[in-house]
Amino acid sequence: MGANVHGADFETMDGSRLWSVTLFDNSTSFTLPGLSPDPLPAGMVRMKVNAIEIPGVDLNNVAFDDLADKLTRLSSNELIFTR
């Protein structure tokens, strides 16, 4: 069974990180909690999404530094949206 890890970083347009989410359970979606004040500002926000596939890895017991030779897929993309 492949280990799938997904992540998303939310940034300002100048690259300052606002929020980072990593999913270790094969999920492909998430809901950000409501916080006050909201860490995501009004206006333009960049969301960078990453996914990796590492077959045969148990995500409950892993040292990521030791997995470079087992990584089979890596992808990333970004989206700019206005709040």
Image: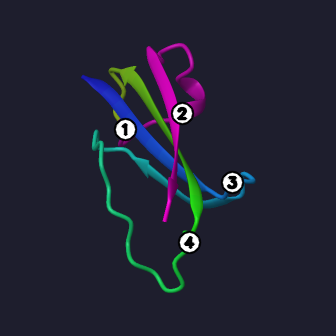
Q: Is residue 74 above or below residue 8?
A: above
Name which quarter of the figure residue 62 lies in. Answer: top left
- Left or right for 53, reference 38: left
At x 54%, y 84%, the residue is: 37
- Pointer 1 residue: 59
| Residue 26 x %, y % | 28, 39
At x 48%, y 25%, the residue is: 75
Q: Which residues are magenta?
A: 59-83
| Residue 57 x %, y % | 36, 27
Q: Which mark is residue 42?
A: 4
Furthest toward the left, the residue is 1
Q: Which mark is residue 13?
A: 3
Task: Specify which label sits upstream in the sequence, 3 or 1.
Answer: 3
For the N terminus, the quadrant is top left
The CA span between labels 4 and 2 is: 35 Å
Where disc 4 sits, the SS reads loop
Task: Specify which label sits upstream in the sequence, 4 or 2.
Answer: 4
- Pointer 2 residue: 64
